[in-house]
Image: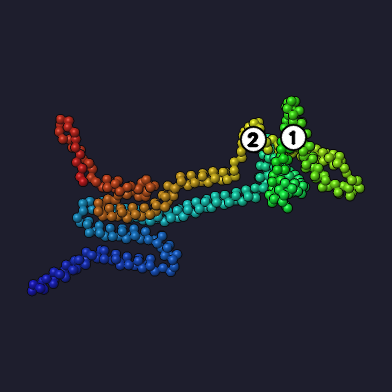
Amino acid sequence: MLAKTFETVQETMKDLFDLLSSMVSWIPGMQDVLFEFFTESDSGWTAAAKALFLLLPLLLWLSGVWCTQLLLYTLPFRSGRLSVSSTMLLAWWDGARMVWMYWVGLVRLSGVTVGWLFMLVRLAVKLLAEAVRQIVMMPFTMTGRMTKSYFTPGVPWIAFIMLIIWCLLEALIFTFTLFPTVSEVMMDLAGADRAPKLTWVFLYLFLFALIMGSFACVHTLAESYTKREYRFLVQMILVEVFVMLFEVLFLYRELVDAITPWLAQQTGYKPGLIFTLSLATFGWIGVRGMNWFLFGRYGAPPLLAFISRQPLAEQEGAARMAATPEEPPWWRAALEDFKREIAWLHERSEEFLEYLALPVLHLLAAALNFGMILVTSRPVFSLPFKGLKDVMETKEILARLRPHVELRPQSQAGHATAREVER
């Protein structure tokens, strides 16, 4: 009899437990169906689309269902059942709105991302096109700059380079002409069968320095005449005469002797010593005069200034060049444009962060509201968020959940008040 009674009570308790658990027992089966929906996908793109658009909304749905069903168990023991029930219904309304705002936020995020990518691509194309244009226009730009610098007062580099090239060329010609004579003299002095191997090099360097000195003497003579320094002018004329005699006797005479057989063959006249020296003198005057008026008078001053380590440009020319504003490089404008674009991106980064975070935060906040209604009978977030500033920190949430602080005076004599905070 006792065993039968126990079995009856056990069956009654089982039926009661089944009745009570029937409100949540269907939820695990629904979760299995949803899990199969996500795992059984035709392709990876389909699975990614499901995870992106449906995973978080379905998780919010599950949290809302669990919290709502569990809240039904607590309604008989709660005060303010009508208020709690209406709050839960409004939480479902907020959840539906947040799901819609999640999808709209994804669309808005996609549009903003595409727009920013288009802007970055446009900036890259603009930089690339400007670089290509500068490369194509580089010959014309360099020509313009060279022409501008050429007509700007300053150092006559062209005359200086032409003077150096002429000195090198003239030294090479006279080295080739004098090398047999110098070689014989070196062999007689050294008592050897042939001249040393470095004779050609030292002879070339010696003649190069000698020819540059000749142009320096001509420059000093012309400068003395320009400044009307007559005492110094007489000295320079004597020096220039000696320089001319030295070059005529040892350089130009050898050159004339080298071409004399050709002259005798063409004219049938055998030139003598006076004719040779006269022809060498006229040759020296003609060559020096043409070179001096062409580039020597402009190239000699920079040569002497370079050797003496003095300023190459005149003060007026240097002042004009310094006063002339330099044209900024082509890439500076593009770089400034890029800096402005980056500054704009930094200013909009917070906005982009909101576009990225708010759709997910809306769903998480709605799910948390379901749980807070189950525990505290009231939600903690006011949805939707207008920005990231509306998302409260954990300390603010805990401070909102604490009871209000009560202030009680300790005595009527004006003692300090004490706050009792329930922790």
Task: Identify the element where label 1 is drawn.
Answer: helix
Residue 194: percent from left, percent from top: 72, 52
Q: Would residue 339 be found to the left or right of residue 259 on screen?
A: left
Numbered label attached to residue 308: 2
Residue 128: percent from left, percent from top: 58, 51
User: Looking at the picture, which amino acid does disc 1 mark?
Assistant: Val
Question: Residue drawn 53% across and 53% down?
Answer: 121
Task: Identify the element where label 2 is drawn.
Answer: helix
Report whether residue 114 is seen: yes
Residue 354: percent from left, percent from top: 41, 49
Q: Would residue 350 be found to the left or right of residue 231 on screen?
A: left
User: Looking at the picture, which amino acid does disc 2 mark?
Assistant: Ser
> Residue 219, relative to residue 15: is it above or below?
above
Numbered label attached to residue 218: 1
Identify the mark nearer the N-term, 1 or 2: 1
Q: Nearer the viewer, residue 330 or 390?
A: 330
Q: Would residue 81 be found to the left or right of residue 175 on screen?
A: left
